[in-house]
Every structure is written in structure tokens, then in C-alpha cells.
Image (cartoon, grey):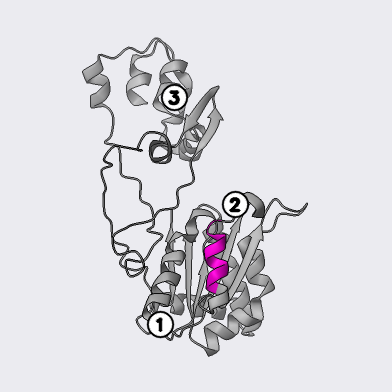
Amino acid sequence: MKAIAERASAAPLLTDLLDPERKQDLETYLWGMELIDFLVEHPSAHFAPEEFVGLLTKLQPRLYSVASSLKAYPDQVHFIVDVIRYESHGRIRKGVASSFLAERANDVPVPVFPSVAKHFHLPENPDTPIIMVGPGTGVAPFRAYLQERKAIGAKGKNWLFFGSQHEKCDFAYREEFEAFKKEGILTRLDCAWSRDQPEKVYVQHRLLKNAAEIWKWLDAEGAHFFVCGDARRMAKDVDAALRKIVQEQGGKGNDQANEYVEKLKSEKRYKRDVY
């Protein structure tokens, strides 16, 4: 952007937005923007190809949570990928990795960047109850957890909160989760479909609806609480719901509830993998 502002015959907006005092305005402006948008808006800015490429940062790997257990599928790794497609600034946009995997990776080798989330794993004690909150593609690691617990014969209870827009077309792994319930692997499954009724229902609403039982699992039974998925809103709303449950069900003041949740974190009983 600085380079375009320097080369364009007139770029007052860019110049203003690059002022450090306008950081929030810059973030708002950048939402949904791509390199080509800046060039289209400032046709007087010219670059030699080598010069242009030299200004670009290296494309970063896209990290996907593994959705399978090696104990269940020793020769495979499963992913759940939501293909991103939307229109912005008059053009159809596609997710860099998701559309590549969906449309162009059928018979070609795909480079892989393994990354270990050391903080985000099942409790060492297989008898420990777990509460899993994973709407959308955030359900990936919890499918793996359930497969793992089944494979090792873990006795710990498992409670999954899953959510998406529509039950009919967005219920990922439905048959598998229902089978886990019949087998007794998945103790409870609570779903939130945000667009299947007039009022929007999200996973945090399901958490609050089951506040007393969640408190029992956490405080009396020592359950671990996992959250995976959207960091921008979902994870914040779930965190607020958790603190409210602790405060109301535990009969605590605001500061005490916050201390309780922070203790869960320090004991590695409250784990988040959000993005």
C-alpha cells in the first residue's frame, strides 16, 4: 500500500489510512480486499514485475485441524474443509487453500506443512470427562478425540456442542456422531442451528441452557473444557458464557468467577484452538 501511495498520481485515502492513528479505520478498509483491488483503484501506479513480486510477503500455510485419529485410520489423515466463495468489490473471491483443495488438487501432490498444537490434546487420564465446543469446521479435532477414545477404550464421558446454520445441509459427520451416541462413546450431543428458526441460536446459547450440568461436570467431576473454531466472535462468546455459568452456578462474584476460569487455564483444563 505504501508503494502504491508513492507511485499513484493521487492516493489521498491510502495516505490517510497509513497514518498510525487510523489503525482501526485501516483494518475496516482492508476487510475483504486483495492486492488486485488496490491496483484497480489506483491505475496510475505502475510496477515492473520483479519490483511488484519483491513487495509481496510469502504465502503462509493454511492450518487445518486433523479430523481423524491415527488409531482409527493409521494410514490416513482426514480434514473437514469449508470451501470459501463470496463476492466482494464486484468480483467472485475464493479461499486460497479451500478452493485449491476442492477444485484443483484431485490428482496432484499437495505440499503439507505439519504443525503440532502441543497445548491442545486429550487429558492423560482416559477416565476424565471432556466438554467439546466446536461449531462448523471447529468440530474437526473432536471427531478425532472421539475416535481416539473409542479405540483405546476410554471410560471418560464426552459431551459435544456443535453448531452451524442449517441442520439439513450443515450437520457434518452426523451419521458418525449418532453412531458414537448409540455406542455410548458420545455421552451428550447438543446442536445449535442458527438459521433454522426466526431467532439465531448459537453454541453459547446451548451452553447456557445446560449451565447446571456443565458446572457439575467441571466442578464436581473435573472435566476438561475444549473450544475450537472462530476466534473473532464464537470463542469470545463461549468464553463469556463459561464465565457466566461459573458465576451463576457456582454462586461466585465476578472476580471469583474470572479467577476460577483462569485457574482452569493454568491447570490446562480449559484449552482453545481458535483462528
Q: Which residue is mark 2?
A: 170
Residue 267, located in which quarter of the rendered image?
Answer: bottom left
Magenta stretch: includes residue 176? yes
Indicate left or right for 209 with 87 as reference.
right
Whichever of labels 3 and 1 marks the residue nearer the N terminus, that label is: 3
The residue that appears at 65% across and 67% down in the rendered structure is 206
Instruction: Decide if residue 253 is in sight here.
Output: no
Specify few, some or many for label 3: CA neighbours under 10 Å numbering under 14, 14-19, or 20 or more. some
Could you tell me how far apart the alpha carbons at marks 3 and 2 are, in whole angstroms? Answer: 40 Å
Q: Main secondary structure of the magenta part?
A: helix
Q: Which residue is mark 3?
A: 14
- Tell us which disc is closer to us: 3 or 1: 1
The amino acid beneath tag 2 is Asp
Residue 48 pos. (x, y %): 25, 14
Label 3 SS:
helix
- The image's mark for residue 153 is 1
Label 2 SS:
helix
The amino acid beneath tag 3 is Leu
